Image: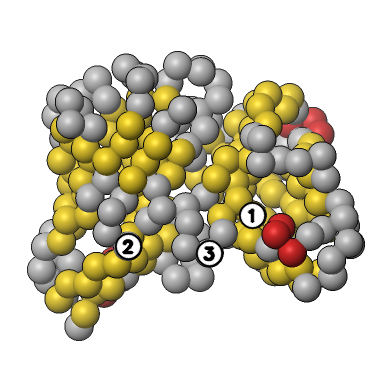
Amino acid sequence: DTGVSQDPRHKITKRGQNVTFRCDPISEHNRLYWYRQTLGQGPEFLTYFQNEAQLEKSRLLSDRFSAERPKGSFSTLEIQRTEQGDSAMYLCASSFFYEQYFGPGTRLTVT
Amino acid sequence: AQTVTQSQPEMSVQEAETVTLSCTYDTSESNYYLFWYKQPPSRQMILVIRQEAYKQQNATENRFSVNFQKAAKSFSLKISDSQLGDTAMYFCAFMPLSNFGNEKLTFGTGTRLTIIP
């Protein structure tokens, strides 16, 4: 297994457009997390899945954000009607227990 | 809610020297884990070391060790014999264990460490 992968690595979009990111976790990991990291800051928790169930969403996750993890495998994070404030690195992490393994992230730039 | 504070935004040290990065945290939790993660430039976050709060013995991983002071809520990282590959952002992170099944991390703002040849 090659670790957590994310696609795309970079995304540039115009304000108002919708974007979707994908995360493929390590295959035996049942827990999957999304974090957002802005310049000069540490990652902030967005949402969490255990298998296919989304168990927690941060207040940072507005109604324009939606995440899914069908069949408990890969996960997608969609942002509708993007705003310039959405520009950030979106990180995915997976774990089987306490140690989280991070993907390379998707860097979103909203122009 | 938990907070994690890293008061050193940037540090630099000569290759082969020892450097200590500071981290303090605030929590009402009694059972938790603490982590140090490393994020090299343009590369993904890597786990460096983990400390369980119930363990009194400080964790070590090769050249990396921690000084965990539970009463003071302090968790510093010591890097011995620093190498050029240690150049990275280092994040301290807190994980409460009270919400089993959702072990989300709270991160500090990071310390940018540069190893000088």
**Labels 3 and 1 in the same subunit:** yes
Residue underneath mark 3: A39
Q: Residue furthest bottom?
A: B117
Q: In this view, does B24 lie above or below A38?
A: above
Q: Which amino acid does label 1 sit on?
A: Tyr
Q: Which amino acid does label 3 sit on?
A: Leu
Secondary element at image label 3: loop
Q: Which of the chains bears the disc numbered 3?
A: A
Q: Are marks 2 and 1 in contact (CB under 8 Å)?
A: no
Q: Earlier in the sequence, mark 3 or mark 1?
A: 3
Label 3 and label 1: CA atoms lie apart by 12 Å
Residue A15 pos. (x, y %)? 84, 66
Identify which residue, A9 or A73, lies in the foreground: A9
Q: State left or right for residue B99 relative to residue B114.
A: right
Label 2 and label 1: CA atoms lie apart by 22 Å
Q: State left or right for residue A24 relative to residue A40.
A: right
Q: In this view, does B7 lie above or below B81?
A: above
Q: Quadrant of residue A2?
A: bottom right
The residue that appears at 79% across and 44% down in the rendered structure is A65
Residue underneath mark 2: B9
Q: Which of the chains bears the disc numbered 1?
A: A
Residue underneath mark 1: A90
Secondary element at image label 2: loop
Nearer the camera: disc 2 or disc 1: 2
